[in-house]
Image (tube, rainbow, N blue to C red):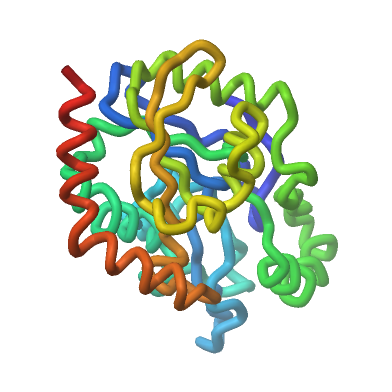
Amino acid sequence: MKYFGTFPFGMPVYEVVQLYRTPKRAFLLGVYASAVHARWINIEGKTIVNALAVASEPTIFWRGENAEAIVEKVRIPEALGKLIPARQEFNGPSGLALDSLILNPLDLARSEVWLCDLVPHSCVNPSQAKAIERAYSPIASKLGLPEPSVPRLPNPLTDENRRNEILNEIKESEARTLILLGDLPIRWFLSFFDHRWSKLSDFGLSYGRLHHICLEGKEINILPIAHPRQIARLGQSSFHWYDTHAAWVKQPANQVAESIKANIG
C-alpha cells in the first residue's frame, strides 16, 4: 500500500484503489479520492471544525458506511475534546450519488464496475487547508501532534506514468465501457489518446451516449457523464449539468444500459 502523507491527528493518507480486480462490465474514472470527515468538538462542547478530513476513505467512491468506527480510531488528546462523524453530507455523498444517479440508471451493480480515480489518494482542498491552519496547526507543535501533510491536488493532474497505470487497469478490467466523470478525466486522460474531446461540453447533444474508440489497441466504448457533485448538487455545481443529467436519466439511460449489456456478449 502506498502512502502519500498524514492527516491532522496522524492517520496516513494512503492509496485508494479498486479492491476486487476481476473482469468487469464497465470501468469508471473519477478525479481524486475523498476522505472521512469528523466534527471536532472541544471539552466545552463547542464545535471547532464542522468537517475535518481525518482519514482516507476505506473504499473508492465510499458511501459513508461505518464512519463512526473509522473516526473512533483517530487518536486525539483528551484536552482537545473529541471527534465524531461529520454530517452525512460530508461522508460518502459522491458514492451515494454515483449509485443512485449513474449506476442504477445503467443497471450496473458496484460489483460489475471497476472504479478508479485520476489521483488515487485524498487531496487537501482550500477549505480544509484553512481549517487546518486556523484550528490545528497553532496547537500541533505545542502538543507534539503530527504535522499534517495531505497533498494538494497535483498540477498537472496526471503525468504519463499515471496515465499508463490507468490504461493498464482498464486493460486488466476487460471492461468494454469506460465511464468518464466530468471534464477532468476527459482532459487529463482521454484527450491524450483521442484528440476529439477535451471537456464534457465537447460531446454536445451526445451527452451520456456511447462513443466507440480505440484506446492504445483496446476497442472500447466511452460514456461521458457529469461528475456526481454536479448531478447531485453537492456544493458548488452547475444547473446545466444537473438538468442535462436529469433528462438523461428519464430516457437515454435505458437505451445506453441495453447497449452496454449487448456489448458484453
- Residue 203 coordinates in the image, percent (x, y): 49, 51
Residue found at the very far top of the displayed protein = 217
**In this image, 102 relative to 201: left or right?**
left
Q: Residue at x 51, y 70 (%)?
A: 82
Say which quarter of the image contains residue 191.
top right
Compared with 40, 28 (above or below) is: above
State the image coordinates of residue 202 (x, y, percent, origin top left). 56, 52
Q: Residue at x 57, y 60 (%)?
A: 53
Tell me the quarter of the picture where residue 42 sits: bottom right
Viewer-side residue, 90 vs 135: 90
In this rendering, position of residue 156 left or right of residue 214: right
Which residue: 30% across, 33% down? 113
Q: Can residue 59 be seen from the camera position used here?
A: no
Residue 23 occupies quadrant: top left
Which quarter of the rendered picture does the N terminus lie within? top right
Task: Give left or right: position of 23 versus 193.
Answer: left
Q: Is residue 249 left or right of residue 151?
A: left
Residue depicted at x 68% and y 62%: 125
Q: In which quadrant will I find the C terminus?
A: top left
| Tally of numbered tags | 0
Looking at the image, residue 218 lies above or below residue 210: above
- Front residue of 250/37: it is 250
| x and y percentages locating residue 43 in the rendered image | 55, 81
Q: Position of residue 105 (x, y in %)?
A: 20, 52
Residue 50 can be seen, yes or no: yes
